[in-house]
Amino acid sequence: MRILVIGGTWFLGKAIVESALSRRWAVTTFNRGRSGADVPGVEAAHGDRTVHEDLVKLAQFGPWDAVIDTSSSELAPRDVLLSTTSLQDRAARWVHISTVSVYAGWPHEPLTEESPLLDCPANADESFGYTGEDGSPTKYGFQKAGGERAVAEVFGDAAVFLRPGVILGPGEYVGRLPWWLERAKRGGRILAPAPAEQRIQPVDVRDVADFALLQAAGSSSGGFNVAHPDGMSFGGFLDECLAATGGNGTPIWADPRVLSKGGVKQWTELPLWRTHAGVWAVDSQRAVEAGLRCRPIAETIRDTWRWWAADGRPVDHPRWADHGIAAEKEASILASL
């Protein structure tokens, strides 16, 4: 197999590249060369995917059996369209890393691949879309839905869309799991979002990478929800964080109404906590039937702690500062319980 990975220097992109190289695939990567070092063993091409001339130069490195696009999260649909049209004659397939945010019902409703998508044109610019008053739908979701349409219009049945919810694991740049690990290590009374039995479905970055490669080499098309099919309770998640770090802590489970009254921001101040009915009700059966295999979440937690304790934060990213409740705010809410 000969593939092009757009991105390829950190977290999911890096995991895809490393897994592909371990299979002795030929890998070309394309990025701006700003966020991290190219993985040894790749054929590295540098440039800006929003610049036509850079894409013309990139096309000369082809052809490829497949493109895996890991770097479209901040792009307008029209920029994705530029990439697909520029490379359509140089690649047989396109595996696009998307998001569950493309669904119109996210996060209020349980999701399958048949759930309606947000409507966004393939040639939309970065101004298209809006974020609802309650935080959904999101402008981000509209933009990603438009990106999917841009790929579908060019690659048709040779297009695959992977729609993860939350990706965790070694190399995480957002800071969700590292924050919980650090909080567990600090110990004491730990503010936790009730109910403890709430099931969550984060998926390991290495498992997403392997599934992306499986789709690159396969013949499937369309969308796949990429979420852990078994999941884990929030209580089990915190227990594993405590076990991994050796923290001497006790979760104090607070009713969501108490957290809301205390001004705790869902999804960020207590990472992975969100009260909407559909946020952890993502059906991934189609992906499982197509070969998605997910390691136990406890393994992801342990491996992430080993990476974090050894290497620390991988890159500076603006989303990192959004995650985690301030110690003073946490203590104030705990004192009221």
Image (cartoon, helix red, strand yellow):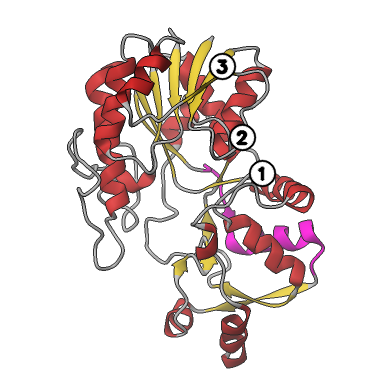
| Label 2 – label 3 distance at C-alpha | 17 Å
Q: Quadrant of residue 242?
A: bottom right
Residue at 59% x, 32% y is 14
Asked if residue 71 is among those painted magenta in the image, a careful observer would answer: no
Task: Identify which residue, 144 or 321, lies in the foreground.
Answer: 321
- Horizontal arrangement in the rendering, residue 243 relative to residue 85 (left or right): right
Percent of width and height locating residue 143: 28, 44
Q: Secondary structure at mark 1?
A: loop
Residue type highlighted by circle 2: Arg
Q: Which label is found at residue 185?
A: none
Q: Secondary structure at mark 3?
A: strand
Asked if residue 238 is among those painted magenta in the image, a careful observer would answer: yes
Magenta residues (range): 228-247
| Label 3 – label 1 distance at C-alpha | 21 Å
**Magenta stretch secondary structure, dominant:** helix
Which tag, 3 or 1, sits closer to the chain's start? 3
Q: Is residue 48 above or below residue 248?
A: above
Q: How many marks?
A: 3
Residue type highlighted by circle 3: Val
Residue ID for mark 2: 206
Residue ID for mark 1: 170
Tags 1 and 2 touching, CB below 8 Å: yes
Tags 2 and 3 touching, CB below 8 Å: no
Which residue of the protein is positioned furthest toward the front in this rendering?
53
Residue at 21% x, 51% y is 129
Task: Identify which residue, 323 or 300, lies in the foreground.
Answer: 323
Residue ID for mark 3: 27
- Horizontal arrangement in the rendering, residue 165 relative to residue 11 (left or right): left
